[in-house]
Image (tube, rainbow, N blue to C red):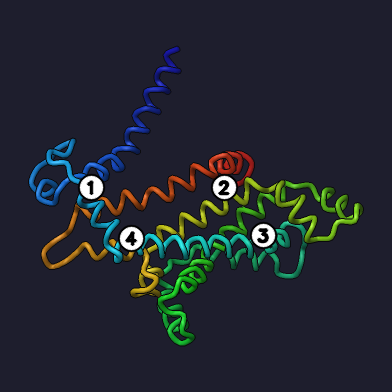
């Protein structure tokens, strides 16, 4: 009984520790800049929603969310689409240099985005892709595709090869077998891979800021505009932070079952 109570206390303290930054962000978003910088209070003394109104009525703010959602969705779809056949090849076949190629993919994920910022900027400026959604989506594929391949390959190895052979004997083409039989078996892995691709692309700042200026500017880049000569607009920045958390929370809610199964069965 004492062990159960101790575990409950530790878990409660841990959850409170995790929720304190989120609560403080919400608390700041409901205050004016004067109250934020002049007083310390656990609750807003002068409750205001002006910070949220500023974001939801100013196109330069809310279009940052729209742009981010567009290129994040594009990147997630592209990364999973490319990673599925690649992971299947790594999990089912042995070919010359397969281990070296797999390691090379992972080294791309290990490299910092700053290494590729200048090459991407010069390349996209030359071909006319600068300040477009597809530019950021493709740039993020350099990091998300290796991650998705690594995750999916682990799940695919857990599927017996006899399933593939049985499907071929039954007359299934590869495309039909892969979409109707194989993909449902690794649905949890696809959910985990999509979750990580979404989260990385959503929070990444350097590439999204370097490769965009106006038309495809992300919310992460837009949030930096709160810094000005007159100081930091803390209230608007906090409100933007709260609204930035919501898409990630929604994604976690809708794929929570897949993530739970993935963490339990996969090697993530």
Mark nearer the N terminus (1 vs 3): 1
For label 3, the crowd category at 10 Å Cα-Cα, with few meaning under 14, some 14 to 19 and many 20 or more, is some
Q: CA distance from mark 1 to mark 4?
A: 16 Å
Decide: few, some or many residues near mark 1? Use Cα within 10 Å; few <14, some 14-19, many ≥20: many
Mark toward the start of the polypeptide (2 vs 3): 3
Q: Are marks 2 and 3 in contact (CB under 8 Å)?
A: no
Query: How far apart are the two marked residues, 2 and 3, measured between alpha carbons?
Result: 16 Å
User: From the viewer's perspective, is 123 left or right of 29?
Assistant: right
- Mark seen at residue 84: 3
Residue drawn at point x = 65 percent, y = 67 percent = 100
Q: Name the residue: 8% across, 47% down.
A: 38
First along the sequence among labels 4 and 2:
4
Identify the residue under disc 1. 29
Residue pointed to by mark 2: 268
- At label 2, counting other C-alpha atoms closer than 10 Å, the crowd grade (few under 14, some 14-19, many 20 or more) is some
Q: Closer to the camera: disc 4 or disc 3?
A: 4
Q: Are marks 1 and 4 in contact (CB under 8 Å)?
A: no
Picture coordinates of residue 16 (x, y %)? 33, 33
Q: Which mark is residue 62?
A: 4
Q: Residue furthest top?
A: 1
Gap between marks 4 and 2, in whole Å? 34 Å
Image point (37%, 23%), residue name: 9
Alpha-carbon span between mark 2 and mark 1: 35 Å
């Amino acid at each position: 009984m004492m062990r159960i109570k101790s575990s409950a206390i530790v878990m409660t303290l841990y959850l409170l520790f995790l929720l304190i930054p989120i609560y403080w962000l919400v608390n700041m978003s409901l205050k004016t800049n004067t109250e934020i910088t002049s007083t310390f209070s656990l609750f807003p003394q002068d409750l205001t929603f002006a910070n949220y109104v500023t974001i939801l009525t100013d196109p330069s703010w809310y279009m940052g969310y729209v742009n981010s959602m567009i290129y994040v969705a594009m990147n997630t779809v592209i990364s999973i689409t490319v990673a599925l056949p690649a992971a299947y090849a790594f999990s089912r076949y042995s070919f010359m240099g397969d281990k070296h190629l797999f390691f090379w993919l992972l080294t791309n994920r290990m490299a910092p985005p700053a290494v590729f910022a200048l090459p991407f900027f010069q390349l996209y400026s030359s071909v006319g892709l600068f300040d477009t959604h597809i530019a950021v989506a493709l740039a993020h594929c350099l990091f998300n595709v290796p991650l998705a391949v690594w995750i999916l390959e682990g799940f695919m190895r857990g599927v017996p090869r006899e399933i593939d052979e049985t499907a071929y004997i039954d007359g299934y083409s590869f495309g039909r077998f892969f979409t109707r039989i194989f993909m449902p078996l690794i649905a949890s892995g696809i959910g985990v891979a999509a979750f990580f691709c979404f989260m990385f692309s959503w929070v990444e700042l350097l590439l999204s800021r370097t490769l965009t200026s106006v038309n495809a500017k992300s919310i992460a880049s837009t949030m930096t505009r709160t810094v000005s000569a007159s100081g930091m607009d803390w209230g608007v920045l906090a409100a933007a932070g709260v609204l930035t958390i919501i898409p990630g929370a929604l994604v976690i809610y809708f794929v929570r079952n897949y993530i739970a199964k993935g963490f339990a069965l996969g090697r993530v």
